[in-house]
Amino acid sequence: MVRKIGSLLALVGIVLVLCLVSAGCTDTGGTGEPKKTIRIGYVTWDCAIASSNVMKQVFEEAGYDVEMIAVDAGPLFQGLASGEVDFTTTGWLPHTHAHYWEEYGDRIDYVNENIPGAARIGLVVPAYVTIDSIEEMNDVADKFGGRIVGIDPGAGIMTRTEQAIEEYDLNYELIASSSASMAAELGRAIDKGEWVVVTGWSPHWKFGRWDLKFLDDPKGVYGAAEDIVTLARQDLKTDDPEAYAILQRFRWTSEDIASVMTDIADGMPEEEAAKKWIENNRDTVDFWLGKA
């Protein structure tokens, strides 16, 4: 009988140890509940990198495991529509991403404008360039080398620029590259005092570093000022009300996002730039998290 009791106690002890080991292997974030996961989709534009890294740390503070998914604009909207991406903070509407919204918008949740009315896209040149309108570009095509320096081919601004070339009958070639390559070529040209025209958008750190201007667009190909928008998969609101509430409260300014972009452009790692902004804007972040 004593032997049976001893065996039973030993068995109970083994079960308890296994339970403790199992509990120790479960990441609860200190809440007693398993951590939830959130997936942030973004295009590798400077503004999207800045915004997404800030929100990554905000959601980590809220107790989430965060997965960052870098994709082109088309796959980003497709991922939101299919539910493979939970949200993005840098939809540009109603103009830049208009064709993606037309295709996928009925399957995506338009959460809110996190920077309302402050965004603009178009063709950008150094301020010393002596033309002011896209209509004048053919007269000085040789000075620009017949080239418009673009970014990644899937970007909405590239589609708009192809339309501008057609609408204005421009004798130019649109060169696809990347956001970083475009900015680097812009900087090299300015250092030499050369003419260069690039696909540009604001807010962006380049406007703080160099004296630049948008070329006038009398045909309205690039549209007027637009919003930077938070978009989510349709079921996020019901699947995770806490995450959705954070997104609803997330609003900041062009100056906020520009400060993060500038730090990154100046060589600060993305995570450190985001952390610096959060530390300097604690009240704003606490509001997003529902603490204030």
Image (spheres, grey):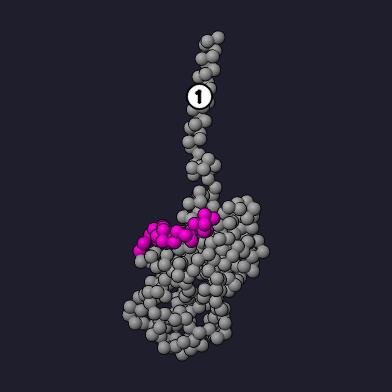
Snapshot quadrant of residue 181: bottom left
Residue found farthest to the bottom: 139
Measuring 42% from the left and 80% from the top, which residue is drawn there? 212
Q: Residue 29: x, y in percent?
A: 49, 44
**Residue at 44% of width from left, 61% of height from top?**
281
**Residue 138 visible from this viewpoint:** no
Q: Which residues are magenta?
A: 267-292
**Considering depth in this image, is 3 or 129 the residue closer to the camera?**
3
Q: Where residue 111 sits: x, y (%)?
A: 60, 62
Looking at the picture, tell me which residue is in the foreground, 258 or 283: 283
Q: Amino acid at mark 1?
A: Ile
* Residue sitting farthest toward the front: 292
Would you say the magenta stretch is mainly helix, strand or loop?
helix
Q: Residues within 10 Å of mark 1 (few under 14, many from 20)?
A: few
What is the x, y in percent for residue 287? Answer: 52, 59
- What residue does disc 1 label? 14
Give the residue displayed 59% in from the left and 65% down from the top. Answer: 112
| Residue 272 in sight here | yes
Q: Position of residue 119 (x, y in %)?
A: 52, 73
